[in-house]
Image: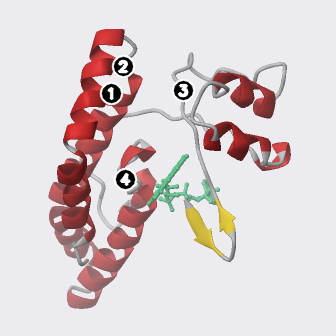
């Protein structure tokens, strides 16, 4: 993903045992080995990245849950609704939460009422995004060759419908 000013970031995900330590050969070598047969831009990107800039993050999924608020305390962002990065919405929804919670506190100075309103405004959208992230994560985890073939055909056929669904996701105004 382009970050502007000639910089970009990338991430690669793989299924692993819980809290698996880094490979003895090092993060970069492990990635080079895992992605050696991919479209040439992928191994080139890995080769062009400094090992020190490659971070390991353990990802866990969880269905959306409530409540986020108790009395005059509430949660937002990953603390309220952790999600896999498959939809690229974790930071976006954290910023949306911040905007909505600020508006609710402006309209309703009592934090208990404001936080209840914030949660009721945010939960339906968040639930849909977390569930979609879980679903796309599951599609990425397939390893049965038949299921992988079907998934790849489906994604190719549905390309424009998928990009349209992102348009409506991005059209939201907090
Ligand atoms: C590989 C990857 C790719 C991603 N890509 C995207 C993307 O393209 N688009 C997108 O929108 N999101 C993306 N995300 C998700 C995004 O990074 C997170 O959803 C977002 O950072 C959550 O923000 P947050 O403020 O809720 O939590 P965090 O960013 O985790 O911030 C919490 C902060 O609290 C600090 N903290 C924790 N405990 C304490 C304490 N006791 N005292 C003081 N400070 C404390 C932590 O150090 C941290 O700085 C991606 C995530 C991953 C892992």
Q: Of 22 and 139, which appears nearest the observer?
A: 139
Q: Quadrant of ligand 1?
A: bottom right
User: How many labels were placed on the picture?
Assistant: 4
Considering the numbered disc 1 on the image, is that residue within a helix, a strand or a loop? helix
Q: Are marks 4 and 2 in contact (CB under 8 Å)?
A: no
Cα separation, mark 4 vs mark 1, equals 22 Å
| Quadrant of the snapshot with the C terminus | bottom left
Q: Nearer the viewer, mark 4 or mark 1?
A: 1
Q: Nearer the viewer, residue 99 or 73?
A: 99
Disc 2: residue Cβ within 8 A of ligand 1's nearest atom: no
In the picture of the structure, the residue carrying the numbered disc 2 is: 142
Question: Would residue 86 be found to the left or right of residue 162 on screen?
Answer: right
- Frontmost of labels 2 and 1 is 2
* Residue 14, label in figure: 3
The residue wearing badge 1 is 138
Q: Earlier in the sequence, mark 3 or mark 1?
A: 3
Residue that mark 4 sits on: 80
Task: Say if 23 sits above or below 44 in the image.
Answer: above
**Residue 49: % across, % down:** 78, 48
Determine if the C-beta at disc 4 is less than 8 A from ligand 1: yes
Marks 3 and 2 sit apart, C-alpha to C-alpha, by: 11 Å
Position above or below: 164 against 55:
below
Q: Identify the residue shown where x is 64% and y is 38%.
A: 40
Q: CA distance from mark 2 to mark 1?
A: 7 Å
Q: Are marks 2 and 1 in contact (CB under 8 Å)?
A: yes
SS type, badge 2: loop
């Amino acid at each position: 993903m382009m970050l502007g000013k000639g910089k970009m970031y990338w991430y690669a995900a793989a299924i692993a045992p819980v809290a698996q330590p880094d490979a003895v050969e090092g993060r970069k070598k492990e990635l080079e080995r895992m992605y050696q047969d991919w479209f040439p831009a992928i191994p080139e990107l890995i080769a062009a990245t400094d090992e020190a800039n490659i971070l390991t993050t353990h990802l866990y999924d969880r269905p959306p849950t409530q409540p986020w608020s108790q009395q005059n305390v509430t949660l937002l962002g990953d603390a309220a609704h952790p999600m896999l990065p498959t939809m690229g919405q974790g930071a976006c929804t954290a910023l949306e939460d911040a905007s909505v919670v600020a508006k609710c506190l402006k309209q309703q100075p009592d934090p208990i009422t404001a936080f209840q309103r914030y949660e009721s405004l945010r939960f339906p959208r968040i639930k849909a995004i977390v569930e979609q992230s879980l679903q796309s994560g599951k599609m990425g985890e397939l390893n049965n060759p038949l299921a992988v073939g079907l998934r790849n055909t489906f994604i190719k056929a549905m390309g424009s419908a998928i990009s349209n669904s992102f348009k409506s996701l991005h059209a939201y105004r907090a």
